[in-house]
Structures are given as C-alpha cells and as structure tokens.
Amino acid sequence: MNLSIIRVIFLSLCFSLTLDAESKKQPNILFIAVDDLRPELSCYGSEHAISPNIDRLASMGTLFERAYVQVPVCGASRASLMAGMYPTSERFTWYGTRFDKPTVSKHNSTTSCTGAPNVPDIPTWFKQKGYKTHSMGKIYHYANDNQDAWDVIDRVGYFRAYALPENKSTNPPYESADVSDDTYPTGIMTRKILGQIKQAKASDEPFFLTAGFSKPHLPFIAPSKYWDLYDADAIEFPHNYTFAPENVPSSAGIHDRAWGELRSYGGVPKRGAVSDEMAKKLIHGYLACVSYTDAMIGQLIDELERLEMLDNTIIILWGDHGFQLGDHTLWCKHTLFETSMHAPLIVSAPGFTPGQRVSSLAEMVDIYPTLCELAGLDLPDHLQGKSLVSVMEDPNRTHKKAIFGRYHAGETVRTDRFQYSEWDNGGSMLYDHKVDPSEDKNVIDDPKYSKVVDAMHSVLKNHRKKVEFDANTNLNALAEETSNNSSGNTPPIWNSNNFNQKGTGNPYASVGDQYTTYVNWRVTDIEEKLSKDDRRLKFKKVSGPQWLSMVGPNYGKLSGTPSKSDVGVNEFILSVSDGVNPPVQARMVLEVK
C-alpha cells in the first residue's frame, strides 16, 4: 500500500472520529429564571402583554400551559426547584429559605425552615458531570447560597435601583425613566450574561448558564420606552378586582397583611385598598417590566443564534411563582390561589418538535429530572419530580394527575379540574375550575362536592406522608355520583402503561453483567399509602425474555444477566396486584447492549 493511500485512510478516520465526537458533545443549558412572572404573556393568551421574544422561545420549544410552583414565595420556591424536592412543614417554607442551611426569620422566630444541604442541587450535579456552572443574576434568593456549586457567581445591584434621584429617598412602587436598558441592573446583568456566552463559545466545556431576571419584581422600574408600549387609558382591572371569593376562609390571606410587600413602598396606604389610579399604574408598571425583561431574553437568544450555538443548547424559562394584580382585591403573591401558584414554563431542546403546547399538569420539581434526561445524565436518587421529556415527545400524554404546593400552614393539591387547599387551623377551600376558572366561589360546603373534598383531603394526606402521588381517582365523576367500585378500594395505577428505563440510573443492560432495577416507584396505590409499613402490592413478570426475573415481588425488583442472544430491544409485560382488584399490566422496554 503506497503512502498516499495510507494518508487518505488516516485523514478519513480522523474526520470520522471528529464527527463522532461532535455528535456526542454534551448540550449547553441556558437556565432563565424570572422573578414574579405570572403567565401574563402573549404566548399564554394574554391580550395585554407584549412579549415577542418569550413568544419566540415558545415557538422554538414546548410550552407547558399548566405549570405550577411548589411555594408561592421566592426563596422557598427556588430552593425546592433547585433541589428537585417538595416542600414540607419544615423544609422550604418562607421567602428567606436557603438551600444550603437552615434559616430563621429575624422578624419572627417561629418562621424557620431547613434547607437540603445533604443532596446535590442542579448546578452541583451538572458540575460533577463536567459542566461549567454560572450563577448569573438572581437564581437562589441569596447570591451566596450553596456557592460551591458554581464556578462563576455574579449578581448586579439592588432591586430598588431607581434611576431618578427623587425616587431614591421616597421609594415608590414604580418608575418610568427616559434611560437606556443598561441603566438598571436588568440591562447590566444581560450584558454580563452575553459576555459569558461569548466565552463559552470558545471553550470545549459544556455550560450550565443561568440568567436570573429580577423584573417584574417590585418596584416596577423600567426604561420609559417599555412603558410607552402600553396605552395607560386602556389598562383594565381583573373582573374580580373589587371582591374576594365567596365563602373564602380567613386562612386564605384575604386581608391587609397579605400584601405587606407592596405596602412597604412609598405612597402605598398602610391599610385598605390602593386607589384606582395607583392600581392602574401598578398594572402598567408590571407589564412594562415584563416587556423589559422580554427584550433582554431576546438578546440572549439572538446571541446564541449569531454564534451558531442554538442547535446544541437547551433553553428553559420558568417563573418562580405567580403574582396578583388586584385579583380578588389582592396584590403580590403569598397565597394558594391560582394567581399565586401558576407560572410560565417553556423548554426548548434540540431534536424536539417546535411550537408544541402541553396541557397536562406539570410542576417545578419536574425541571431537575427533565434537564438530566435532556442532557443524557443519570438522575440522583433524591429527586421527587418526574421528567417532562415523555410529554415533550408526545404532548397529548398525561404527565401527572395531581400536583402539590404549600405556604406556611396551608397545603394545596391541583388536579385537572379541582384546586383544594386546607390549613392547620381547619380552614379549607375547593374550586371547580370547570365552571369557575377564576376561583370566585369556594364550594367546600356544597354537598355536591362532598366526595371530592374527601378524596382531595386523602390525596393531601398521602402526599404529606410520602411526598409523592399520582392520583387514580376520577374526581370529575365524584362531583356528580358515587364510585362504581363497590369495595371502596381503588386499584393500583402505573404512572405510565408503556415505559422504558431511559432517564433512570440503569438505562440499559449489558451482556454478561448482572442487571437490577425496581419498578415499585412507577406505581401508586392510595390504600397502600395510608400505611407506611403496608407492603400488600405484589409485582409479577407476565411475559418477556427469560434472562430477567421478578426476584422481589413485594418491591418490584427485577434482576438477571443477559447473553449475546438478548442484544437489542427487549419487551416485558409486568403486572401489579393489590389483592383486591384485578392485576394491572404495563409494558416495559429495556435495551441490551
């Protein structure tokens, strides 16, 4: 073989290896967090908000129409999301929550909570997997929270960063100033994030880059050009601006103290309602801040596109909770109403159909496992959320049947149709979103809904005990008629009737190596959850290749060693029985390599 032929073969091999390395390059992640952002965006159906760049992101990815936070206050919501864990009565409870250690309010010693320092948060996990992690802007409530997780930490300025001198002493709740974007911290932070993107382009290291925007958090300060996007005379109040929900309990927070955050600003009355003039200006300021932050997000997307990085970058945008803009006479957050709990969630990832919308329920604890699966990382054992990737693959799937949140002594559960909340002092409320999407009438005492109330209370009780739930109760039917199950026992349910092992700690089996996995976590049974020690569920392998056996029927433990003849996709039919109802089957697919 002559030298020229050898050279051609060598160069072809190098080119092939280069292409293979590029195809296996880990995706970058742009993690956009927006403070106090309710779904007041055009892509969510708002007729008022001007948000072309977030709308563009939605057209690039998957928009989750019904995503909910775990806690309607900044510090706790963010710590829960970053940990991938639900709040409890002792964990992630108040705005001053830290992830890395316990906290106590300096104003009220009874307000305290633990963090979750013994588990890896999102940046820690990605850093361990080879990512460079950047905390840019507001991600945790405190810039130095779990600081070892970050390679870079940068947060600019104070959120009351007024541009007009007269406002620096009076602290009004809003400001419109004829200044450039970069006058305020929002614009300054954007410049810094753009710089980090440029640096990342020149690096072989994948990045986990956060972009934490503080607006539309109070005070509503933005350059006047964003205020000018809106006609002040056309600002409208919500339809329930002048009244609280009918039959609402005092625990729900319909009182002056519920929006003390706003009352801390100059010119806002310490008691009673704000004037209609101020209310309109507050709504105007909120919308201006949404458009300001939207413009900054657009610059980040443009820069990724300019640098040809979009094709290998996962972009996720989320709000840390909702915000009341006069709804039910309320301002700010701090309640368990839809207006406090509902927040935007958009995920754009390479390889998925653009412009998708998911109507199934989702919650922010689902973000951590979703990012892991999208990035091809295994999942840490502590996670309590469920990856959203399956509904990104098929938006018509049901992701969850029940989602959960809490605030101080109150807990809430949301299903497809109902929102139920209860407090330690005995207060409770139930809203039927089929007929009352604005939650104007609490039907907790309506006999028609008595069975729904009992079921929802049970769901919360079960969740409280094990901090996990995927309901198998037809609550719609319970609103009108009794269950057809004469035994009063609900059968177990598989979270998915057709699943694979991708996204788990054991995504595939290898020839000659023992493979072990558990499937009990894929099943929910209401009656079993009522007793921590009750192991009455029995799992069985119905069919499938012989190499894998159900060796632990009480725990759904499967184990075995595949041979070369098993290489490829293996299909198994599994069943679970509670000893009362007929066994329920599901299909499991497992690849052998």
Image (cartoon, grey):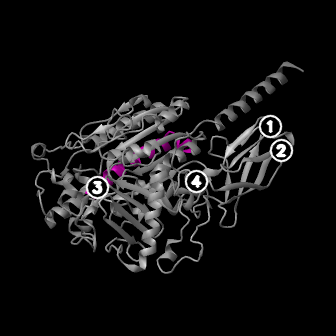
Mark 3, Cα crowd under 10 Å, few <14 / some 14-19 / many 20+, is: many
CB-based contact (under 8 Å), mark 1 and mark 4: no
Residue 359 forms part of the magenta stretch: no
Residue holding disc 1: 511
Q: Residue 534 carries which label?
A: 4
Question: In front: mark 3 or mark 4?
Answer: 4
Residue 419 vs residue 523, the one in the foreground: 523
Judged from this view, the residue extending furthest toward the top is 3
Q: Residue 566 carries which label?
A: 2
Query: Can I make out residue 43 in this image?
Result: no
CB-based contact (under 8 Å), mark 3 and mark 4: no
Report the Cα–Cα distance between label 3 and label 4.
37 Å
Q: Is residue 476 above or below residue 361?
A: below
Residue 198 vs residue 71, the one in the foreground: 71
Report the Cα–Cα distance between label 2 and label 4.
36 Å
Q: Is residue 505 left or right of residue 106?
A: right
Q: Position of residue 123 (x, y in %)?
A: 47, 36
Which of the two labelled residues, at mark 3 and mark 2, occupies the earlier sequence position?
3
- In the image, what residue type sits under mark 3? His
Q: What stretch is highlighted in magenta?
A: 286-313
Total marks shown come to: 4
Q: Where is residue 243 in the image (x, y as percent from the top left)?
A: 23, 72
Residue holding disc 3: 334
Which of the two labelled residues, at mark 2 and mark 1, occupies the earlier sequence position?
1
